[in-house]
């Protein structure tokens, strides 16, 4: 699943995100969602989340 629909992502979801610094390279970071930061129900570039380790980025892939 891609990470453009907010309803698909909940705290505790295992995801791959792209960090702001990695947007050009497209490098993905794996982690567990702590908070959802995007309030819109759908976002074309991916829902912005905070991982449990504090990193913030947009969800590119849902692994659960």
Image (cartoon, helix red, strand yellow):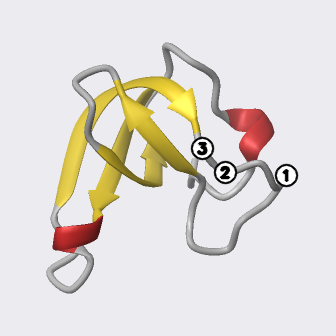
Against 28, residue 45 (above or below) is below
Q: Which mark is residue 38?
A: 2
Q: Are marks 2 and 1 in contact (CB under 8 Å)?
A: no
Residue 18: percent from the left, percent from the top? 30, 60
- In the drawing, does residue 45 fall left or right of residue 22? right
Q: Are marks 3 and 2 in contact (CB under 8 Å)?
A: yes
- Measure how far apart labels 2 and 1 are at the Cα level: 8 Å
Please give the name of the residue rendered at 44% of the width and 49% of the height, measured from the top-left corner: 61
- Measure how far apart labels 3 and 2 are at the Cα level: 4 Å
Against 44, residue 10 (above or below) is above
**Callout 3 crowding tier (Cα within 10 Å): few <14, some 14–19, many ≥20:** some
Residue 37: percent from the left, percent from the top? 60, 44
**Callout 1 crowding tier (Cα within 10 Å): few <14, some 14–19, many ≥20:** few
Residue 42: percent from the left, percent from the top? 79, 59
Against 8, residue 19 (above or below) is below
Q: Are marks 3 and 1 in contact (CB under 8 Å)?
A: no
- Measure how far apart labels 3 and 1 are at the Cα level: 11 Å
Query: Which image quadrant for residue 19?
Result: bottom left
Task: For mark 1, give the secondary structure.
Answer: loop
Q: Which mark is residue 53?
A: none
Task: For mark 3, give the secondary structure.
Answer: loop
Please give the name of the residue rendered at 21% of the width and 56% of the height, measured from the top-left corner: 28
Q: Which of marks 3 and 1 is in front?
A: 3
Task: For mark 2, give the secondary structure.
Answer: loop
Q: Which mark is residue 37?
A: 3
Query: Which image quadrant for residue 40?
Result: bottom right
Against 39, residue 36 (above or below) is above
Q: Among all residues in the image, which is located at the extreme right?
A: 41
- In the drawing, does residue 5 fall left or right of residue 41? left
Q: Name the residue under label 1.
A: 41
**Callout 2 crowding tier (Cα within 10 Å): few <14, some 14–19, many ≥20:** some
Please give the name of the residue rendered at 79% of the width and 36% of the height, measured from the top-left corner: 7
């Amino acid at each position: 699943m891609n990470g453009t629909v907010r309803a698909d992502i909940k705290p505790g979801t295992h995801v791959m995100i792209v960090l702001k610094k990695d947007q050009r390279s497209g490098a993905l970071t794996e982690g567990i969602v702590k908070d959802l930061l995007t309030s819109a129900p759908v976002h074309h570039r991916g829902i912005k989340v905070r991982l449990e380790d504090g990193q913030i980025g947009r969800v590119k892939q849902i692994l659960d």
